[in-house]
Amino acid sequence: MKKTSAGALNKRLKSPLQLNLSGDCTEKTRLVVAFLVLWVAWILFTISLDPQELAVGALISFIVAWLTAPFLFRHPPIRQLRLSRIFNALIYLPTYLIAEIRAHLKVIYLILHPRMPIRPGIVKVPTALKTDFGITALADSITMTPGTLSVDVKESEPALYVHWIDVKSTDPQTTSAQVAKPFEKYLSEVFG
Amino acid sequence: MIEMLAYALMALGVFCSLVGGVGLIRFPDVYTRLHANTVLVVGGVMVLLLATAIFAHTWSFSVKAILIAVFLFITNPVGAHAIARAAHRSGVPLWKESVSDALREEAK
């Protein structure tokens, strides 16, 4: 029986596929991507292929895309499509779901406890992620789990300032290990 | 069988909504209340939407319910982050028994 650890599998999956997204996104790319996402969302919401609906949707999608395109992403989310990214993204989903359920139980306990034993505070959480998309994904994951809430980002380090409802330590090393690490180890593979 | 699952999800969603509402009242300041808000939105509304999607008689209804859940999933963390950041920038104080405020120390 052959045993393959996740690490070895990761290494094997690291070879790049054909798609190579180098260079920055131009204004036109952003406009097209925003337009397509909005239009598909419109079609899914109306669930009809009636020409009038499609036309109105296209018009509104174009206006919104044209207004918002300058504020959208400057770089593509990933430079190269690799199997390891897809693999880690797939592991990330159940990991995230379990973290979500555990955080819910914790905060529900804190809410219903008669004496409300909370120790809230803002702590600094350094992160190893470097790309915009990676940091955004981490901050969103932290905010979406109850009990931790990202308040601000320091892009130069990079570090997040996280409001933690049950502060266990204010030491950056410990906070990073407790708050960011469970998400970070997969996100760094997905977006790194 | 699938209906039982939908009922279970509905019960869970209603319970989380109730607890989130209690948390919004009981917690002492803006930042802690946003945690209760997350319980309400993720555990309450999104689970209820999932139950709705299972219960729905037509698939177009299910698609809409799931799409709303996805939009909530995208917008809720952004909104919570924006509220917390704006509150801290405009000087809303933390609860008096808060343990630390790394962001304020950094600004000094």
Image (cartoon, helix red, strand yellow):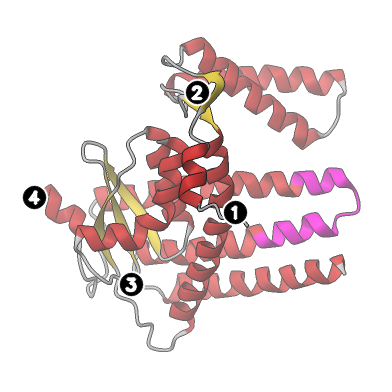
Q: Which residue is mark 4?
A: B108
Q: Which residue is mark 3?
A: A166
Of callouts 2 and 3, the N-terminal one: 2
Q: Is residue A35 left or right of residue A5?
A: right
User: Is the same chain shared between marks 1 and 3?
Assistant: yes
Alpha-carbon span between mark 1 and mark 2: 51 Å
Alpha-carbon span between mark 1 and mark 3: 43 Å
Alpha-carbon span between mark 2 and mark 3: 38 Å
Which numbered tag is attached to residue B87? none
User: Type of residue at label 1?
Assistant: Lys
What residue lies at 53% left-to-right and 14% top-to-bottom? A29
Q: Nearer the viewer, mark 1 or mark 3?
A: 1
Q: What element does badge 1 sit on?
A: loop
Q: Nearer the viewer, mark 1 or mark 2?
A: 1
What residue lies at 53% left-to-right and 51% top-to-bottom? A92
Residue A59: quadrant of the picture: top right
The answer to whether any part of residue B93 appears in the image is no
Alpha-carbon span between mark 2 and mark 4: 35 Å
Of callouts 1 and 3, the N-terminal one: 1
Q: Which residue is mark 2?
A: A68
Front-most of B33 and B105? B105
Label 4 Cα crowd, 10 Å radius (few <14 / some 14-19 / many 20+): few
